[in-house]
Structures are given as structure tokens and as C-alpha cells.
Image (cartoon, rainbow, N blue to C red):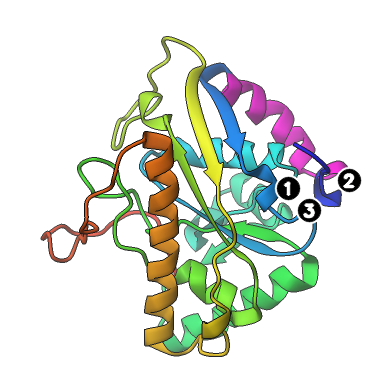
Amino acid sequence: MGARSSEVTRPSLFWPVAVIVIPLVSLLAKIRVVGAEKLPREGSFVLAPNHYSEFDPLVVAVAVWRAGRAPRFMAKESLFRIPVLGWIMRRTGMIPVARTSSATAAKQTMKQSAELVEHGRGVIVYPEGTLTRDPELWPMRGKSGAVRLALADGIPLIPMAQWGTQEIMGRYQKGLSLWPLRKPVRVLIGDPIDVSDLRGRAGEQAALNEATTRLMNAVTELLEQLRDEKAPAERWNPTTHGQKETGRLDS
């Protein structure tokens, strides 16, 4: 995979977590990562993967760790109040997201972005905000959380796609499909998305919409490569399809 960052080679709470999580995930998934070199060895980044299974955060975390970076997620603030889990999340630098007004959310984003740059950390943000509602598991309409972070301080915005996790745990499935073990899961990391023309306009909805469209197009193209098929011409929109959006938060 090449050189690993200091946040992976330096002792931290990630080490004992990795010792437990990676072998367990590896029993269920044979993960192949392509494009690991697209993640910067040092410094901040925003990584935006597709999302269609409750199990895929573990796949993404293992892939990022193997690529040489520490996997930090943007997660619901309520999770940080859970004993033990909340402590681990705070100590490993996960980013809490609260339900706030648009003005408060903008200030929160600026603060979070500045902290990523200051500490040279990456963060994983699901741009769809929840499990895709698309019947064929293609990425649906994106939200602006990932691009807000990236635009605020010029942080690299990197698309990612993974496929195969649905064979381990399908969308809305309650349990894991344990047999056969080590089901193949492929992960593809893309080139950083060029949003340089939109920087300095992070407060404008038009700029956020354009950046989000570019991001979702890039994630979809990566997934097309993994699936070797074309996505529908029209991206699934829960609002127009009359479905209520629930699940993970995205600022």
C-alpha cells in the first residue's frame, strides 16, 4: 500500500481497536482496495463513500487503515453520549454532528474544518446522509455535509465506492450472512474532485449544490466501474419518490 502516515504508525487508541476489528471483519470480507495512493500520506482530507449497508462503515474503516490513514467518521452527536463508545469516539477524533439551524451548522462546519486542518486529520462523511433508497443500491441524491467541510478550508475532497458488502449484510437486514466466509468486497478510491472554482463560496447554496453534484457523479462513476454497469440516468431522490429520509445525519 506504500508509506503509512504517522497517525497510523504512532501508538494510539486506534491500535487496540484495529487489533480487534480488522481480524473480525477479515473473517467476513476479503477486502481489495484500489487507489489507496489517492489518500494523502499526511494532512487533512474528506473521504466520501457510497452507503447501502449498515456493515459498510467497517469495510470503509478497514480499507482506510490499510491505505495508511486513521479512519475517523462524522457521526451523530447522540452516539458520543453512550458510555464507552462515546469515550472511544472522542479519543479517536470522531466528529459529532448535531441537529442545528443553518446558521449554527455553518459555524460548526467552519470550526470542524479548521480543526481537521490544524490536526492534519481526515474524516469520512457519507454524502447521502443515510443508506441509499435506490432499489438497485446506486447512490441517491447527496447532501452538502462533505462539500461544506471541504470548501471551508480547501481540504481535498475524495470520492470512494465499495461493492460486495451487501452479500454480508443487505440493506435493512437485521443479521449477518456468515457463510461462506470471506466474501469478496472491492473498494475503489478516486482522484480528488476539483472544486477550486467554488472555494470562497461555501456559504452559497448554488456552490454547495454544484459541488455536491460533482461529488455524487464521481462516486457513481467509481461504483459503475466496480459493478461494470451503468447507473440510471436519473439519480434517486427520496423527496420526489415520496419516501421519508431517515438514518444517519449529515450536516
Q: Nearer the viewer, residue 126 or 112?
A: 126
Amino acid type, mark 3: Arg
Above or below, comparing residue 14 to residue 104 in the picture: above
Q: Which residue is mark 2?
A: 10
The part of the chain drawn in magenta is: 9-26
Which percent across, then down, holds residue 143?
A: 38, 68
As measured in the structure, the alpha-carbon distance from the residue carrying label 1 to the one carrying label 3 is 7 Å
Q: Amino acid at mark 1?
A: Arg
Give yes or no for contact between labels 1 and 3 (Cβ–Cβ under 8 Å).
Answer: no
x and y, in percent, of residue 233 in the image: 22, 56
| Foreground disc of the pair 1, 3 | 3
- The image shows residue 225, relative to residue 28, as above or below, that is below
Question: How busy is the neighbourhood of tag 1: few (under 14 within 10 Å), some, or many (20 plus)?
Answer: many
Residue assigned mark 3: 41
- Residue located 38% across and 60% down the image: 217
**How many numbered marks are there?**
3
Which numbered disc flags the more N-terminal residue, 1 or 2? 2
SS assignment at label 2: loop
Query: In the displayed structure, would residue 180 be above or below residue 123?
Result: above
Q: Between 207 and 103, which is closer to the camera in this rendering?
A: 207
Q: Judge from the rendering whether residue 216 lies leftward or rightward of residue 120; answer left or right.
A: left
Q: CA distance from mark 2 to mark 3?
A: 14 Å
Amino acid of disc 2:
Arg
Split into 4 quadrants, where in the image is the N terminus? top right
Q: Label 1: which residue? A: 69
